[in-house]
Amino acid sequence: MGDPKKQRKKYESPRFPWSITELTSELKLVGEYGLRNKRELRRHRYTVSKYRTRARQLLAMPDEKRLKLETPLLNKLQSIKLITENAGLDDVLDLSVAGILERRLQTLVFRNGLARTPQQARQLVVHGHISIGNKKITIPSYIVSRDEEQDVHFTPTSFFAKIESGSVIEQEVTNK
C-alpha cells in the first residue's frame, strides 16, 4: 500500500523535455483541454502508456493465459469508452492521450455546452456546480464512464441550474 507520507510521482517526465515538437504538442493539448499544467497532461500520458504496455505484455503471452487476463483490461477500457465494443488488443495499442482527455469531466462539461470554455468548465467542476447523477463531483480530471455520461448536469442547488430552469428569471420579473 505504501506510506501516505511518501507519495510517488504519478507521471513520467519526457525523454527530451526541450524538444520543440514536444513542447508545442504539449502546449496545444494543455490549451485545447484547459488543463492547469503539463503535469496533468503527463499523468494522463502515463496512464495511456500503462494500458499500452499491459496490452504488449498480453500479446506476448500464450493464448490460454492471455484470454483470461485480456478480458478485464478490455472491459475496463470499454467501460470508460476509450475503445469500441468489438475492439481487441491491437486497438489498445492505438490509444492516444487525446482519447483519455476527451473522457475527463471537465471536457465533457465543455462539450455538452454547460460551459463556454474549458477553463470555465474546470471552474464549474471545482466550485461544485456539476454533478453526475446525485453525486457532486469536484475533480476536473474525473474519468467519466459510458454509463455516467448522460447524467452529467448542474447540481440542483447550483445557481446555474436555477438559471437553466428559468426560476431566477421568473423571480426577477415578478419583483419588478
Image: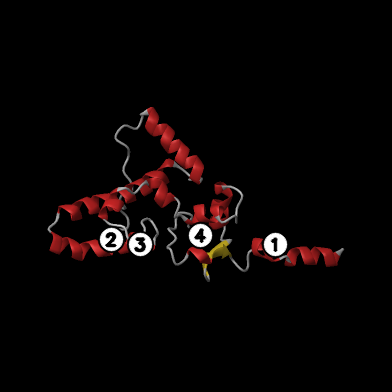
Left or right: where does residue 164 sit relative to residue 126? right
Which residue is identified by label 2?
A: 73
- Residue 121 position within the rendered picture, expressed as x and y whole percent measured from the top left: 56, 52
Does the CB distance between marks 2 and 3 fall below 8 Å?
A: no
Which of label 3 and label 4 is nearer to you? Answer: 3
Amino acid at dot 2 = Leu
Question: Callout 2: 10 Å neighbours few (<14), some, many (20+)?
Answer: some
Q: What element carries label 2?
A: helix
- The residue labelled by disc 4 is 138
Q: Residue 147, image x and y in percent?
A: 44, 67
Q: Is residue 112 above or below residue 35?
A: below
Q: Distance between the residues labelled 1 and 3?
A: 38 Å
Foreground mark, 2 or 3?
3
- Sequence-wise, the earlier of marks 2 and 3 is 2
Q: Mark 1 points at which residue?
A: 163
Residue 85 badge: 3
**Which of the two discs, 3 and 4, labels the residue nearer the N terminus?**
3
Answer whether residue 9 is visible to the viewer in this image: no
Q: In this view, does 11 lie to the left or right of 103?
A: left
